[in-house]
Image: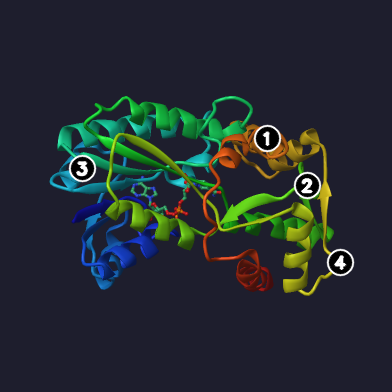
Amino acid sequence: MKIVLTGSLGHISKPLAITLIEKGHDVTVISSQEERSTAIEAIGATPAIGQLYDTSFLTETFMSADVVYLMQPPGIYFDKTPDPRMSWTHLANVYAEAVHDSGVKKIIHLSSIGAHTDTGVGMLAAHHKVESVLKELPPAVSIKFMRPVGFYYNMFAFIPAIKAQGAIIQNYGGDLQEPWVSPLDIAAVIADEIEAPFEGRAVRYIASDEASPNVVAKILGKAIGMPELKWKVVSDEDFLNGLLSNGINANTAKGLTEMNAARMKNLYDDYNKHKPEAGKVKLEAFAKDFAEVYSRS
Ligand SMILES: NC(=O)c1ccc[n+]([C@@H]2O[C@H](COP(=O)([O-])OP(=O)(O)OC[C@H]3O[C@@H](n4cnc5c(N)ncnc54)[C@H](OP(=O)(O)O)[C@@H]3O)[C@@H](O)[C@H]2O)c1
């Protein structure tokens, strides 16, 4: 099949491209950087260099594709425009137009945990909006919405507080298990979904492992040689102020604080009703990557 991937050689798209090429597919990888072409060709894919926000470029790149993989780049959360979520809605509209104009009939969309609702999930409500925009495409376009849970690599954000204050500091915590996922498991699920039949609109959650915040602290602490590492819970207000003082966009900081608070409320409601089979990459394995990054920080 002819498959077009957004997301360049990122955490998901690189292993996804490699798997699809190994399976014999013709893969095009979109990157915004001309200098990425050599690395894209080196894995056996065709580079398409351009901006995701460029409808003509996307339409031309999607032309004659059997399946396109669409993702929202994360940098948008951290730009300094008043509301970064608007950029995602804009991108969803660009995607919809390019899909429509190119005639693509099968889409895999990288959505997220929390996309089941627009209420009480903070920044993740943007994924609900993006799904709503794509659902407006004609019924002849089949869409598989992939909803991974929180990525393990988000935990790298714990490192500054561990280094400065000797603890993981968040506005949630405790002994209730929550799911985490590796981009490698996401890529494996998407590769399977690309080859499986498409029909109408479908949703699939993706997770690798489950652990409570206190267990996460124990496993990460052991990996970095701090077996007594604790997960400390602070108020939403203190957490928000911490993000703001680090210069994070005000809407993003508020959205992150609400998202974290939702972990103890409604974030996993729909996930718990449609729990996926766990992937292969367990928290203990990620802890080794965490220790490496921690020692280099
Ligand atoms: N973190 C979580 O817990 C979580 C949970 C659920 C869903 N998600 C979703 O997962 C996404 C991240 O996926 P990932 O880790 O695979 O991404 P990633 O590794 O950050 O890769 C994204 C790549 O897209 C390319 N890109 C960025 N802006 C572009 C533009 N304007 N035009 C063309 N290409 C552009 C960049 O590569 P070039 O420099 O080569 O262009 C970038 O490296 C998030 O944005 C979110 O939507 C995240």
Q: Nearer the viewer, residue 146 or 64?
A: 146
Residue 221 vs 195, above or below: the answer is below
Tell us which disc is closer to us: 3 or 1.
1
Residue 173's x, y, as percent? 78, 47
The residue located at (29%, 42%) in the rendering is 107
- Quadrant in the picture for the C terminus: bottom right
> Could you tell me how far apart the alpha carbons at marks 2 and 1 are, in whole angstroms?
11 Å
Q: Can you tell which mark lies on residue 144?
A: none
The residue located at (76%, 56%) in the rendering is 161
> Could you tell me how far apart the alpha carbons at marks 4 and 3 are, in whole angstroms?
52 Å
- Secondary structure type for disc 1: helix
Q: Can you tell which mark lies on residue 173?
A: 2
Disc 2 Cβ-to-ligand 1 distance below 8 Å: no
The earlier-in-sequence mark between 3 and 2 is: 3
Q: Which residue does the numbered mark 3 point to in the structure image?
A: 57
Q: Which residue does the numbered mark 1 point to in the structure image?
A: 262
The earlier-in-sequence mark between 4 and 3 is: 3
Residue 240 vs 150, above or below: the answer is above
Please tell me how many numbered marks the rendered image carries.
Answer: 4
Residue 178 vs 238, above or below: the answer is below
Q: Which residue does the numbered mark 4 point to in the structure image?
A: 228
From the viewer's perspective, is 146 left or right of 70? right
